[in-house]
């Protein structure tokens, strides 16, 4: 049943995925997903974690963040990867 001819979006918006923590505003970081109220991108959080920093180290470096902000960034990335997009990876010559 359709409501008033509204067409549901094919893909969820950033705000609908993590409305209280993650935003995307074209005037902040060029629209990159970021922690609400900051100019800290989800990408930066993931880069720091991938480089081996702990959540505690990130919080120490960015005291205005809280643990839930970092967990929301991780959950946001997870939810993006759950989509119907295929990410082709190069095939290793050794295997």
Image: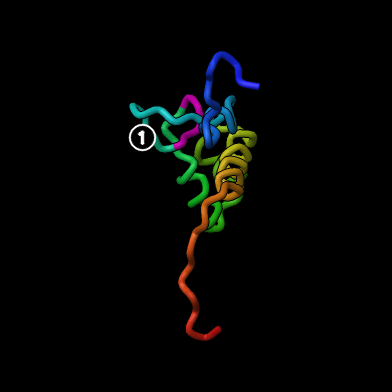
User: For this rendering, which residue is in front, 87 or 53?
Assistant: 87
Above/below status of 25 relative to 54: above
Question: What residue is at 36 percent from the left and 35 percent from the top?
Answer: 29
Q: Secondary structure at mark 1?
A: helix
Above/below status of 9 relative to 94: above
Question: What residue is at 46 percent from the left and 45 percent from the top?
Answer: 44
* Quarter of the image that includes the C terminus: bottom right
* Residue 26 included in the magenta stretch of the image: no
Q: Position of residue 83 (x, y in %)?
A: 57, 47
Q: Name the residue at the top extreme.
A: 4
- Give the residue at mark 1: 29
Question: What residue is at 48 percent from the left and 84 percent from the top?
Answer: 93
* Residue 35 included in the magenta stretch of the image: yes
Task: Count neighbours of disc 1 (C-alpha within 10 A) and say few if under 14, some if 14 to 19, many if 20 or more.
Answer: some
* Quarter of the image that includes the N terminus: top right
User: For this rendering, which residue is in front, 88 or 49?
Assistant: 88
**Which portion, as a residue range, is magenta?**
33-37
User: For this rendering, which residue is in front, 37 or 32?
Assistant: 32
Q: Position of residue 63 (x, y in %)?
A: 54, 33
Q: Name the residue at the bottom extreme.
A: 94
Give residue 67's quadrant in the image: top right
Question: What residue is at 60 percent from the left and 37 percent from the top?
Answer: 72
The reply, left or right, for residue 56 in relation to residue 23 is: right
């Amino acid at each position: 049943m359709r409501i008033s001819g509204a067409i549901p979006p094919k893909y969820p918006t950033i705000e609908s995925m993590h409305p209280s923590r993650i935003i995307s505003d074209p005037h902040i970081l060029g629209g990159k997903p970021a922690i609400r109220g900051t100019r800290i991108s989800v990408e930066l959080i993931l880069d720091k974690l991938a480089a081996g920093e702990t959540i505690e180290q990130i919080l120490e470096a960015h005291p205005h963040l809280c643990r839930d902000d970092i967990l929301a960034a991780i959950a946001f990335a997870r939810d993006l990867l759950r989509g119907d997009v295929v990410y082709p990876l190069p095939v290793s010559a050794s295997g």
